Each structure stands twice: as C-alpha cells, then as structure tokens.
Image: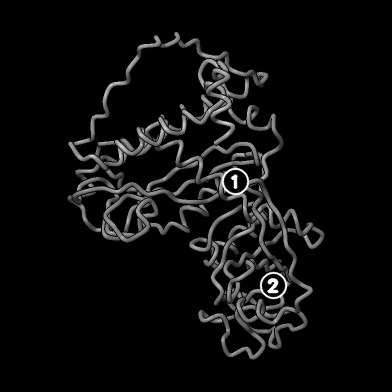
Amino acid sequence: MVLPAIEKSGPIEAWIIDDTSFPKQGKHSVGVHHQYCGQLGKQANCQVAVSLSVANHAASLPVAYRLYLPEAWKKDRARRKKAGVPQQIKFKTKRQIALEQIRWACESDLPRGVALMDAAYGRDARLRAGMTELGAPYVVGIVPTILMWAPGSSPRRMDKPMNNTGRRDEPELVSAKKVALGLPKQAWRTVTWREGSADQLSSRFARVRVRVGYNKLIPEKLSPEWLLIEWPEGEAEPTKYWLSTLPENVSFMQLVDLAKLRWRIERDYQELKQEVGLGHYEGRGWRGFHHHATLCIAAYGFLMAEQATIPPSETRSAAPVQVPPLPDNYQPRPLRPERHVPNSIATMRVRLSRALSKTLIRCPCCGAVAAPRTRRKIMTQ
C-alpha cells in the first residue's frame, strides 16, 4: 500500500540500516541494558532496536524492526520468562540482526536499493562480505584504521587466506587514513549533495579504487571497491570514510549523494517518536514491544500513503485580519513586571515589541497605513 505512494516520487534507491534507542529506568523492560544510547548521546540504561528502511530522496519507511537483546539477557532465565522472550530468540549482535534483515529483504523481493549504514555497522567485514554474497551493493561508513591495498599496489601472497588480524604482516597493507592523506590535491572536489534548511550542503570529497583486507579471505578473491573520503575545508584531517561496491562507472555525484542519504532515517525516527508515539510504549514484554512498533510503523505508512494522494495546493496569501480601531482616548494598561522584576525578560520583551511596532508604517495585522503625521515622524527618524 505504501510503496506505490513512495515510488510516485521515484524508484526505491536505498536500503538504510540503522538503530534507534529508548531511554529506560529499571532493569525489567525487555532488552534494557546499560549501553550506548543515541537519543542521549552517551552510555545509559536503554533499549535498542535495529531496523531496515526502504527509501528514496522523497520518503522512507521501516520494513523490518527487531529489538536487540543484549548478551546479559542470554542466560537470565528469570528476566526472559518475565518479559516473555521466546526460547528460540538467541543472542545476536546488531550487525548479525542487520544481515538477517537484508537477507529477508532479498528473499521478499522488495524493490532493490543500495544498502546504507554508518561506521558502527560498516566496520564489520563479515557484514560487508555477507551483503556481497547476497548481491546487495552497499555504501557503508568505515573507521579510518581499516586496512587495504592502496591504488597501484596489490597482494603479494595469493595462496593463503588472511588471518584474524587482517594480514598485518602484509607489507603493502595501509590504513584508510594513510590512503586519504597520500592523495594528490587534484583528487579532491567540492560536491553539493542537497539543499539544507538554510543553505546548500557541500563539502570536499575524494574517491579511489582500493582492495580491502577482509578476514579469512584469499586476496585473489577480493574485488576492488570505492573508497570515498570527506575532508571539509578548515579541518586538519579527513573526517568521514565510506566503502562502496557500486560499479566502477558510478558518477562522483551519485556516490556522494547515496553516502549522504542516511539523513532520511533520522527524520523517520524523529517523526515516529514525536508524532506517532513510537517511544511511548510503557510495557515490558517482548511481544508488546514489537506489537507497539508494528502499529506505529503501520500508522506512519498510512499517513505517508494518504499524504501522497493530496494534490499540491497553490500558495495563497492569507487574508488580512480585521482589527477594530482603537478609540482616541485609549490608554494602554501599565506594564506588569514578571514576578515583580522591572527588568525581567518578559517585561523587556513587551517594551521591545511596543517600541518596534511604533516604527512600522503599515499595520502587520490589518494592513492599515499609519496617519500622515505619524508616517512623516517615522521617516524622519
């Protein structure tokens, strides 16, 4: 029902993997644990859910949603029973949940999109390798310490798989940060990717083809990938890194545009929490947590579908408000200071508003023009 409404503005371009958190008190709510809480920006007692959203530049919608059950809940039978956690639910990392959601999306024949995720997920080599096996291209954030072969170099020993350390004994392996710092000046371009609330969003980017050192993979099976780096003007070093399995002929603009498309999911979660009530669930059970999220996402999707049926209305100027004229003998009431403080913020705001209103030639409410005598006085001032 919702996908056709989203696709009216264009085909599905991305599958966005992300997680959202819900601050909690106590220890009985299902999945609650002291962990990183994105809503608070620090470690706190909270619940975390992993989601997969389909998106284009006009809209996005979560299509998979799963609570992350921390390892502390793995053997706590009393809490699991009280929260109604099914026995078949085992401990899985957020990255394992994300890969399961991508596999489900591929099997469900959802409209294909490029998988997008931040460095918390993109740094996992097994997750990236799993997406490649599923045939899902990606643009994922990574940390600058990930090892790779820089442009112009290649693996020397091709007969053995890499060890768990990423073959640090390979002399040609360097970090993504070292690759970025070694790029020539002409490799950097200023790219604008979308309109912001105040101005166009742009920054400096560079991209190169590299081979990444995946764990336990034979180097000759590694395919070249795009390494995209952002280095804003005025910064001492690059700030963000991405890896992408998009084709070699993908345009620079398209690569940057997809890397920055993750902002859509942030707006989704903001509206789901503030407008639909995703974060207002007060229960403690596993089933209730997911049931509440399902209803919220369904309501959000219904609103998106309804919004797509409303034709864009023409912009019309509002009719001026008719304000009755004040009598000639009108005397304004004396100012009442807030909490009896003569220089309070409330009092100063009223005085400032009155002083500014006297400088206007035309009334902002009814549009009436000031008297000629008053108008001459204002123009003189």
Question: Is 35 situated above or below 330?
Answer: below
**Image coords of residue 321 (percent x, y):** 51, 13
Look at label 1 and name its amino acid. Ala
| Left or right of residue 271, residue 255 in this image | right
**Image coords of residue 234 (percent x, y):** 61, 71
| Left or right of residue 237, residue 293 in this image | left
Camera-nearest label, 2 or 1 = 1
The chosen color scheme is one colour
Q: Work out whether residue 302 or residue 84 is closer to the camera in this orientation and state it.
A: 302
**Image coords of residue 86 (percent x, y):** 31, 44
Mark 1, residue position: 198
**Which quarter of the rendering shows the N terminus?**
top right
Mark 2, residue position: 222
Q: Are marks 2 and 1 in contact (CB under 8 Å)?
A: no
Q: Secondary structure at mark 1?
A: loop
Question: Is 59 situated above or below 117?
Answer: above
